[in-house]
Amino acid sequence: MHNTGSRLTGIFGGTFDPIHYGHLRVAEEISEMVSLGEMRFVPAAMPRLRPPPMAAVHHRVEMVRLAIEGNSRFILDRREAQRQGTSYSIDTLQEMKQELGDKGILCFMLGADAFIKLTEWQSWRELFGLCHFIIAARPGHALLEDKNALPQELKHECEQRWASGPAELGHVPCGLIFLAPTTLLDISATNIRARIAAGKTARYLLPDATLDYISAKQLYSDDR
């Protein structure tokens, strides 16, 4: 039965080094598609499965804050930035679940390429007991066309979890996977950093307020 008091909370983690319009557009589309009450942006301090970010965590937190200002549904969540050591999603989800209580439903947003590597995550099976997964995939992505594109172990875990549509996520507290066809803009933080390091403009790839902050703090200008 649908719990009308439940609140769907989106979680968007990442290094955001820097945050750009690709991140913001996909967050906006998924918020609308799934009718999220809020979308929490969670900048990671020290991610385990990728190289250390170029910009210090306090700069990345501030860049996110500036980028999402003015969107009442977007919230900056600083918990991973303030946590010592490596960031684990399991810790973040357990904390949020405790804070939101039984009525809160967590929807963890991931790109298709990241989801395919889920078995490398800390306590990955336990994540399904804490949240739903929303997989952002570009139309035409292999995963949207064929769920057999997943590695065997993950494919087996996911078999009974596929949601037929976004409305299903509000009916159960956790454990479903919704494949969301979204407009994935071909913008990458790597490319933005390279442009800035080369003295080229990154305007229109990310919000002006964030770009002005990068310029003021001279971030990425010595990335070469």
Image (cartoon, helix red, strand yellow):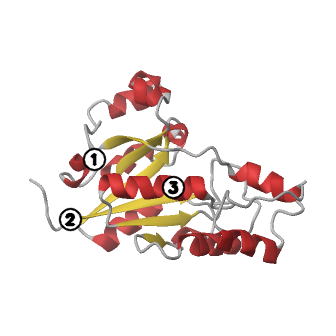
Q: Quadrant of residue 160?
A: top left
User: 186 left or right of 169?
Assistant: right
Which amino acid type corresponds to the residue marked 1 in the rendered image? Answer: Pro
Per the rendering, the mark at residue 6 is 2
- Label 2: how many residues lie within 10 Å, few (<14), some (14-19) or many (20+)? some
- Label 3: how many residues lie within 10 Å, few (<14), some (14-19) or many (20+)? some
Q: Which residue is mark 3?
A: 25
Q: Which residue is mark 1?
A: 166
Which amino acid type corresponds to the residue marked 2 in the rendered image? Answer: Ser
- Label 1: how many residues lie within 10 Å, few (<14), some (14-19) or many (20+)? some
Which amino acid type corresponds to the residue marked 3 in the rendered image? Answer: Arg
Q: Residue 88: in sight, yes or no?
A: no
Say which of 224 and 139 sits in front.
139
Question: Whole-Å distance between the Cαs marked 2 and 1?
Answer: 15 Å
Residue 81, image x and y in percent?
60, 71
Task: Give the mark nearer the N terminus: 2 vs 1.
Answer: 2
Q: Residue 104: in sight, yes or no?
A: yes
What residue sits 49% from the left and 76% below the top? 70
What residue sits 31% from the left and 29% below the top? 159
What residue sits 90% from the left and 62% below the top? 222
Question: Whole-Å distance between the Cαs marked 1 and 3?
Answer: 18 Å
The local secondary structure at tag 2 comes to loop
What residue sits 89% from the left and 55% below the top? 198
User: 183 left or right of 85?
Assistant: left
Per the rendering, the mark at residue 63 is none
| Pair 2/1: label in front | 1
Residue 80, image x and y in percent?
55, 68
